[in-house]
Amino acid sequence: GNKYNQVLPQAQIISSTTAGLAPLTVSFTSPGNAKWVWRFGDGNFRGNESRVHNPVYTFKEGVYNVSLTAYDSSGKPTKPSYQTIHAMGSNNLSLWLKESYNSPIKGIYRMFVLADDKIIWQKDCAGDNGWMHVLRNVDAKKISIRLKCLKKTSINCSLYIDDVYYRLLEHGDFEDMTLMYPPWNQTFSPNAGVGTGLFMGESRSGIQSFRIRFEGDYKKGTYGELYQIIK
């Protein structure tokens, strides 16, 4: 046919799961009949490659960035598609955070991750771009993510949370609003006026993430927090 009318194949990963206890066996597939190259991101030079259309792969403990590349009839590769797989140890907590902060000034807002109300990770908001991966080894019955104002300010700030995985923690992908409350809960400092909720457009995977948003005038110590009690 006319090469200018050729429809290029699309690389789209469909996986049986994205997280679970290691060793984690995952079935992959992709729609269409293109030629594929799967890379399972397990540390080899190019990753383990499989031209099987529907591969099944077992992951050891760790976080893996699986990629799929499709090729057209001339052998030209398309843009790869990616899927993160979390093969968790029994005490692994894995989550992704992204700030939206319109100031170069540090020390105004800080992000926290807590296990049983004890801080296990923290970082000042500093106008950084991109998703940050937090991976910690913890033994906890409560996992919390907090955004806190460190000094009086009228500067806006948002914290996006996505892909939270830990033991029997539920609905850490934030893809379905009807499944979120419970198990997730929210708490705020008195009269905080902090906005929270699912937000489309700033998702690391899927279509949405959870956002804690500060917009207005806030006092030192104002915070918003999302937490879950682990069964």
Image (cartoon, helix red, strand yellow):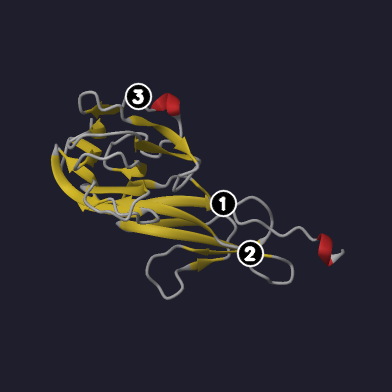
Residue at 87%, 64% (x, y): give it: 2
Under mark 1, the amino acid is Thr
Which residue corresponds to mark 3? 181
Q: How far apart are the alpha carbons under marks 3 and 2?
A: 40 Å
Please indicate, yes or no, whether residue 144 appears anywhere in the rendered image. Answer: yes
Q: Farthest residue to the right: give it.
A: 1
Where residue 39 sits: x, y (%)? 49, 65
231 or 144: nearer the viewer: 144
Residue at point 49% right, 50% down? 27
Horizontal and vertical percent for residue 196? 36, 31
Task: Answer with mark 1 or mark 2, whichever residue precedes in sequence.
Answer: 1
- Quarter the N terminus occupies: bottom right
**Mark 1 packing: few (<14 Cα in 10 Å), some, or many (20+)?**
some
The answer to whether mark 3 and mark 2 are in CB contact below 8 A is no
Report which residue position mark 1 lands on: 29
Tell which circle, 1 or 3, labels the residue nearer the N-terminal end.
1
The answer to whether one can see residue 23 in this image is: no
For disc 2, the marked residue is: 78
The amino acid pointed to by label 3 is: Tyr
Which of 67 and 189 lies nearest the eye of the viewer?
A: 189
